[in-house]
Image (cartoon, rainbow, N blue to C red):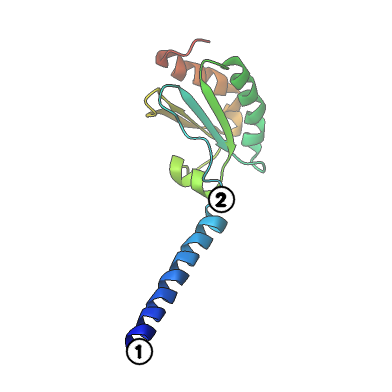
Amino acid sequence: MKNNVANTIILVIVALAALGLLSYKLFFEKGSDFPKPQKGEVTIVELGADLCEPCTKLRPIMDDVKKELEGKAVLNSLLIDNSMKSFYNVKVIPVIIIFDKESNEVARRIFSLEEVDDARNWIKEKTEPLGVQW
């Protein structure tokens, strides 16, 4: 009987630990389904936030670049969350990260408010050597 009680206690502890891990993933790791670089295509990732002034100024520029590069490269403009922050190792926003066709990071730049207008030229400069036609 003592073994049954001990086994039951262990099962309850394991179940509670599993429930705790599941709860953590559900409530603190939202956004884990965000787009990630895929092999076979040049990927440009822009990470920002709604309350970030340089980010909001950068967004329409990135929308134009996305239209211009349609079918030539993948551009993902994302509102950052904790899982993206960890995956992309981001400390400051807005940031643009460029990945080659092997999903290797080849360029990264943080843009200040004054530098946002240079984003298109910088992306072009970094992606042309990767075979992206502008």
Q: Is residue 41 at all visible to an observer of this figure?
A: yes
Q: Is residue 89 at all visible to an observer of this figure?
A: no
The reply to whether discs 1 and 2 touch (Cβ–Cβ < 8 Å) is no
Q: Amino acid at mark 1?
A: Met
**Residue position for label 1:** 1
| Mark nearer the viewer, 1 or 2 | 1
**How busy is the neighbourhood of tag 1: few (under 14 within 10 Å), some, or many (20 plus)?**
few
Q: Give the SS element for disc 1.
A: loop
**Residue position for label 2:** 30
- Please give the name of the residue rendered at 50% of the width and 16% of the height, measured from the top-left corner: 124
Q: Is residue 45 left or right of residue 4?
A: right
Q: Amino acid at mark 2?
A: Lys
- The disc label shown at residue 75, or none: none
Location of the N terminus (image quadrant): bottom left
Q: Residue furthest top?
A: 133
- Please give the name of the residue rendered at 48% of the width and 35% of the height, measured from the top-left corner: 36
- Please give the name of the residue rendered at 55% of the width and 26% of the height, measured from the top-left corner: 75
User: Residue 49 placed where, x, y %?
Assistant: 62, 41
- Please give the name of the residue rendered at 61% of the width and 25% of the height, measured from the top-left corner: 62
Q: Is residue 22 above or below residue 115?
A: below
User: Residue 73 placed where, x, y %?
Assistant: 51, 19
User: Residue 16 placed where, x, y %?
Assistant: 47, 71
Q: Is residue 30 above or below residue 95?
A: below
